[in-house]
Image (tube, grey):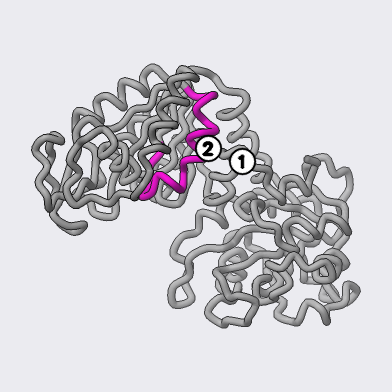
Amino acid sequence: MRSIESLKSIENKKILLRLDLNVPIIDGKIVDTNRIDKILPTINYLLKKKAKLIIISHVGRPNGKIVNDLSLAPISKFITEKIKKKVFLLKEDIFKIKKDEIFKNLDEKIIILENIRFYPHEEANDDRFSKKLASLGEIYVNDAFSCSHREHASVSKITNYIPAYCGLQINEEINALDKITNKIKKPVTCIIGGSKISTKINVIKNLIPKFDNIIIVGAMANNIFKYNGYSIGNSLYELNLNNLIKDIFLFANNNNCKIHIPIDIKVGKNFNGNSTEKEFKDIEDDDIILDVGSKTLKEIKEIIDKSSTILWNGPLGYFENSNFSLGSLEIAKYIADKGDKIFSVVGGGDTVAVINSIKIKNKFDFVSTAGGAFLEYLEGKILPGIKALN
């Protein structure tokens, strides 16, 4: 990929900058600014080079229709406050915008187009729409890794009509993921959680030949407990996955990768209830497994101690209830305290929420705000937005 850092002179050049500003907005206020914070270095870099920016992004799923609650107005205002430069929101129909009419006002250095998903052409990867977008600028920059698994007009097809480069953030993301998948410093360990093992099975399969340890936690582990003949009470699990689990363990064994699961757990009678630590033999029919136990935490810490690289995706338990957040918080702190002794990458919205809740995000080598793109990259899939930049 060609990086914006390779561009020699971009003074007064019109840069089409594709960002992922899809942040949660409640009553017109942004409640989580992580995705915006991560792309500010690219904006500041381009402005320092005296480029003119036309930002393209989306919020939510308006399904090709104008939805006032999904306007980029609050984001435009927030970025203005952060960079101390006015960001002008352009609500005019993209098909009616003329290139020569943009930046007529001398004060305009940054324009943000209204929610790109207000146009059905975006998600349809429409060729005419891509060409129109490209005509508004002179250089295209993608700094939206979290959108790069989508074949959308402003992500992939646009590169057919305009010189394309990657931004600072997308470069950082690829380099971090490359370090844990291709340039690994061993021993390497993956801690992976979630509600359904079926949604992450391809990630696990792709990582097994490269990783030394895979620690499966969260509700994902319930299917393995059941496969091993343990009682799981009233816990969440998926049907008809025994053959899949058998194949995974066989594949891991053949590749010298050890799969670990919790050896004790914490249960509650409901998701909002109190926490009780138990052995599997003591689980009652109405118990729900919602966190790992103290013996499991000790074992995970011992594995971390022997690791040089850590990938963490998915909480260890139902952290939304503080009674079941101890496992996730304790492991987050333990990895963070390793400092330079370990290369750590954290990805996934819930996992990022865990480390943000105790304000230790800066203690990890890389924190990814990408969801689907992060997982698809780990599955070994080719991301359309990345391919388009090569």
Using the rendered image of the protein, determine whether residue 12 is visible from the camera's viewpoint. Answer: no
Instruction: Answer whether residue 237 is magenta in the image.
Output: no
In percent of width and height, residue 109 lies at 77, 65
- Pointers 2 and 1 in contact (CB under 8 A)? yes
Name the residue tied to disc 2: 366
- Sort mark 2 into few (<14), some (14-19) or many (20+) by Cα contacts within 10 Å: some
Front residue of this view, candidates 113 and 210: 210
**Which residue sits at x=58%, y=45%?**
376
Mark sitting on residue 18: none
Mark sitting on residue 173: 1
Span colored in magenta = 192-211
| Mark 2 or mark 1, earlier in chain | 1
In percent of width and height, residue 63 lies at 60, 75
Residue 181 as seen in the image, left or right of residue 55: left
> Separation of disc 2 and disc 1 at Cα?
8 Å
Q: How many marks?
A: 2
Give amino acid for label 2.
Answer: Phe
